Amino acid sequence: MLGALDRWLFYVINDGMANGMFDAVMPLYTDRSYYLLVPFLIWLFVKDRRSAMLAFMLSLLSLTISDGMVHVLKDAIGRPRPFMVLEDARVLIGKGKAFSMPSGHAASAFAVIIPIIMMFRGAIRPVFIIGAAGVAFSRVYVGVHYPLDVVAGALVGVVAGISSIYLHRYGSKWYREERYLQLLFLFLAVISLFRFYHIITGPFELSPREAHIWMQSRVAELGNLSLAPLLASLVAMGGWFFPGSVFGIRAVAAIFMLASGVMMYFMTKRITDDRTALLSAAIFQIVPMSAVAGVILFEQSLLVFFWLSSMYVLLIISEKVSKGGKTKFYWMLLGFTAGMGMLSSIYMIIFFIALVLYMKGDPALKKYFSRPYMYIGIMVGMMIYSPVIIWNAGHDWIAFRGLVGHYIANGSPYMSVTGLLRSSVVQLVMVTPILVVMIWSSVIRARHDRWGSLLFWFSVLPGGLYLLIAILGGDGTSLIIVPYVAGMVAFGTYYLQGAERYKGTRGKLVLGGIVLAFIVSVLSHYPDVLKLSALYNPGTRYEGWKRLGDEVSGVVKELDSEEKYFIISDSCLVSSSLSFYVDGNPVTYCTDVNERPGNSGLRPEVQDMVNYSGIFVMIEGDTYSEHLMALFESCERTDVDIWKRDTVIRKFSIDKCKGLIRKKDSPLFEQGL
């Protein structure tokens, strides 16, 4: 009944009130009404510039809140526009593709005016109210919204406007009491909004590694295979809210880096003061490695947060012990945060080693080796991680063996000067040279202080492991940021604490290091600004995967509509990218012919797909076994070059094979991955 009334009112406004003047005015007013408000805004600034500026800022905040609410509600409600359903609807402007309820224009109009009319009294109020109501009316008249859409939009705008007012009142009171914490939240809000914006509009496609994490989030068994299932679980949650979008995957990174900034503030404040804590937390956010970790999904985004959280709890334990307080609860809390960290990254196990070394050097904590509290905490952490251990124990420790094979080149350790040089260069680029020197000099200087000893061990141990992995020829990229977590706190203690430290050469070096880090971070988000060759552009690794997915989608479309097929690649990372970027997000398969060229059989589930077609996607230079191709009636190859400007950044070949044949005597059907 409500729907019928809504349609009737739509026709009354859209058709019954139609006239030549409205037909000419309403299309202009619906998108340009803010021009009419400019004179009134100028008048407000002349009357009371300070209040007008505050009202303007609150209107922007209200507009941001309403815009987010509108986008979420549109997708959640999914109501079609009137012209999509009503053939006789009069449409006087362009037809939008977004859903209809609530009206974004109506929401924005009321979101903007609410702070103004709440801060100013008199005749100005009816002017702004009539102006916003006119926008809502125009959306129905031009045929792009139902009346209930604009009513819902107006309510969203009112809620957003009132929320902005109360946020300001609460924030003003909080600012007077917690000024530096308030500034931190403002800084983190701005940088997080930028990160969300970059994820949505930036140049980076989903990398194969990120796509593989997304694949893990879809397939339960792959999630169990992972040494860090928490990340896959969070990505699955993001996919539930934003299905099939890069934002739903990468938003996890931005959220956890924001939380890490808050945690670093409290960690540093507990050792120094609130101003130093603000500076340390802010600088850590703009260091290139942290900036990248906020927009690209790595396990280190979660690892940093739980590493900081565990250090913070350990700091509380140390204070409690020195004052004779009770620590049993905090030991269990430490076990919980460390256990969650292990579900985020296997590297969190280093925390327990650093914990032991730190306790051995602290006489007050050393006595806890003979007490049960520490061991209870460790047991709590291992209980949280136990599902991964149990699963791997039942599957020949496949994930742990794979980890060793991944980080030790060719399955056997050897010294790699190149790896050591590469790891050093990565740190100089991702932290910047000035800050690298200052941070590590702070860590070394800190080793003899009570709290400095904590920072020393929790920097040096993960830093040493990162270098060891590099020397052995492995890739410890996921670990690179961890040493700089405690290192940044030490940097704040020795270079940022106290106004006198900002003077002279030291102050210039600190400022230079911060500015350089900020510039490199900005360039890391938009590397094309440097006009580097595609071969040396770090952003290249995040490009071309959608193009490959489009090419495979085109091959799929060439198949008969009733033809069954499967997609398989010689790389599990590439197959994950294909699953994400091929139309319909199909299940894909992989086989590593590079690692096991003599044992590259079809996966067991594929072996049963008799008469299916196979779409094989291979990296340049790889070739599937002739025996494997012989299992099909025919194969047709297409070479795909991925270009960036005038340079080929990667090459693939796509084999479209018809009709999988079941051969009982083929050993390939007896082998699997």
Image (spheres, rainbow, N blue to C red):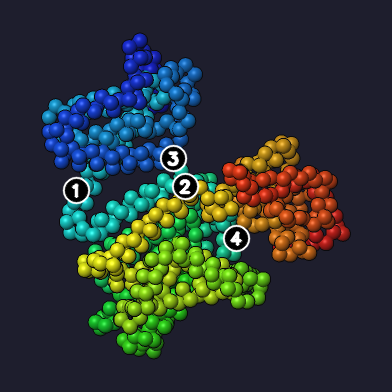
Q: Amino acid at mark 1?
A: Arg
Dots 1 and 4: beta carbons under 8 Å?
no
Residue 394 appears in the picture as rendered: no
Which residue is situated farthest in the right direction here?
665
Name the residue carrying label 2.
529
The mark lying in front, picked from 4 and 2, is: 2
Q: Position of residue 673 (x, y in %)?
A: 71, 62
Quick one: label 2 or label 1, which is nearer the N terminus?
Answer: 1
Q: Amino acid at mark 3?
A: Ala
Q: Is residue 405 left or right of residue 465?
A: right
Dots 4 and 2: beta carbons under 8 Å?
no
Q: Amino acid at mark 4?
A: Leu
Quick one: label 4 or label 3, which is nearer the N terminus?
Answer: 3
Q: Amino acid at mark 2?
A: Val
**Residue drawn 45% across and 58% down?**
293
Secondary element at tag 2: helix
Name the residue carrying label 4.
222
Secondary element at tag 4: helix
Q: Position of residue 182 (x, y in %)?
A: 24, 56
* Labelled disc at residue 76: 3
Q: Quadrant of the N terminus?
A: top left
Q: Position of residue 64 (x, y in %)?
A: 33, 41
**Residue drawn 35% across and 10% down?**
20
Name the residue carrying label 1.
169
